[in-house]
Structure formats: C-alpha cells, structure tokens
Amino acid sequence: MRIALGLQYDGSPYAGWQLQPNQTTVQGELEKALAAFVGAEGTHASSINTITAGRTDAGVHALGQVIHFDTHVEREEFSWVRGVNSYLPNSIVVNWAKVVPEEFSARFSAYERTYIYALHAGPCRSPMMNQRAGYVMLPPNIWFDVEAMREAAQYLIGEHDFSAFRSSECQSNTPVKTMYSIEIISEKPWLYFRIRGNAFLHHMVRNLVGSFLQIGRGRQKPEWMGQLLEGKNRQLAAPTFMPDGLYLSKIAYPEEFAIPSPWLENSWLPAAVVGR
C-alpha cells in the first residue's frame, strides 16, 4: 500500500532534506525511523524509500511537508504517527499518516506550494531567533520601504521564466514557474514574505527575498524586479539570502486525495500572516 505522511521539522541541524553521503539529512533520519518502526513491529526492517513534495535546503524548515512511500506493512494510520515519532529526533515530527491510492504522488500530485520567510530587523539580532528567522541590521527608526517591495512583487505574478532567481545547482526541467501570490506583511520588528506558486526552483525563494530587500532598503527601484525577470541572468540579482527564516508552509493537493492540512499550521506566526 501507499502511505502519505505530513511532517514538520526544524531544518537547522540538517544538510537539507535529500540523502547525501556522510551528511545528516531529514530524509535520512525519517527513513531510519521508518525502518526501525517496521522492524520493531516484527517485520523485516528493509529500507523504505520516501518521495517528498519539496526538497528543502540546508537550514530550511517545514511546517507542512508531505511525503509518501510504498510498503507491505499494514498498520492503523495513527500507529504510523506514534510509532515513527518514537524513533525520530526531537527536531522532526510526523503530524499525520494516511493511506492513499497508488496514483498519489507527494511530488507530482501537488499543484501548489506555499513558503513563508520570517525576518526580523533592527540594531541588534535576537539570540532567541537564532536559526529560526532571517536578520537584517537596521539603525533605530529606519524601516523597509514595504510599499516599494509590494510594487515589485507585482512583476512576478503569473507564469514567467525565473532563471534570474535559479541556483546553478537546480535540477528542475524548466525555469518556467507560475507565481500565484506574494504577500509582504510588516509588523515591526518583523517582516514576513508569504509566497505561493505551483513550484519553485532551487534557492528561488531565498534569491527573491534577497532582491526584495535590496528594493526595501532603497538600493534599487521596484521596476528592477521586472528587469531581473526579463534579463534571466542570475548574476544580476541579489545574493542568495540566509536559509534561517524559510519555512515550507503548505502543499496543496486535489480534493479527491483528502490530504490533511498541516497540524497547528503556522500557529507560531502572527494572525496577520496565518489568516491570509
């Protein structure tokens, strides 16, 4: 049978989602926990291969990650939750488990993905937000030009070639993606980006955030974002911004699969961010 799992994780201890030689990854920890749970239940602990909705980078977090795997082991859905969680480190949690039809794919059945970037700014960083949020040093009484960033965001809505925001290591078949919405929410000392699209390129959100901040700090005009898009040249855009504040927030699937919403989705974020 095919099982889907909903995950949340703190990505700061990991070298990203994907398995890598001699590196600790989220996928590696999850697959070890799955094998241990199956073995503990009296079944041969063969390897379990997982497919994910989105391969998060090193240091990137997830509030609503979805994966699937195939197994001959039959268990109650909540037994998968409790059992696998008992073998996972505290930084990774399975929120729900669901038997899904064979045609379901965590990756290819998804039609929409939402990322949230949480950033705080001011004269001093907060040690409480270390590896949980991005940071920009700003003098007292100085803030970003939020309206300029919102104006810049309009250039990105729709289907475009996002090569200007694509990592050289990106493995996507095409740089053409569709952006549905970009919301920029200002609640000093916090700035949030909520970005929703059909799919994303490697480092795309972090590259977008870096470019938005150039505009928000008055170093570029809003129309610069449109020029970057048209130029399709990664070297002209801003450097890749830090991963600390990036969260894979939600994956959307057709209703026929009845995939649960993330548990306590975005509950730690302000209502202005969650409610949009």
Image (spheres, grey):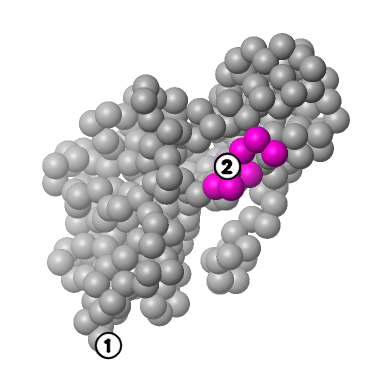
- Relative to 54, is 143 on the left or the right? left
Q: Which residue is mark 2?
A: 89
Could you say where residue 225 lies in the image, as x and y percent from the top left? Answer: 25, 54
Query: Relative to residue 150, is residue 114 depicted above or below?
Result: above
- Relative to 13, is 258 on the left or the right? right
Could you say where residue 29 lies in the image, as x and y percent from the top left? Answer: 54, 32
Q: Mark 1: few, some, or many residues within 10 Å (few <14, many ≥20)? A: few
Instruction: Report the span colored magenta.
Output: 86-93
Question: Dot 2 lies on which element?
Answer: loop
Is 272 covered by the magenta stretch? no
**Circles 1 and 2: CB atoms closer than 8 Å:** no
Would you identify the image quadrant in which residue 134 lies?
bottom left
**Kind of residue sitting beneath label 2:** Pro
Q: How many marks?
A: 2
Q: Which sits earlier in the primary sequence, circle 1 or circle 2?
A: 2
Could you say where residue 152 lies in the image, as x and y percent from the top left? Answer: 30, 60
**Kind of residue sitting beneath label 1:** Asn
* Residue at 18 percent of width and 71 percent of height: 218
* Residue at 39 percent of width and 57 percent of height: 131
Q: Which residue is mark 1?
A: 141
Query: Relative to residue 147, is residue 2 depicted above or below?
Result: above
Q: Main secondary structure of the magenta part?
A: loop
Query: Cα distance, mark 1 to mark 2?
Result: 42 Å
Is 89 covered by the magenta stretch? yes
- Relative to 275, is 154 on the left or the right? left
Query: Relative to residue 22, is residue 10 depicted above or below?
Result: below
Q: Mark 2: few, some, or many residues within 10 Å (few <14, many ≥20)? A: few
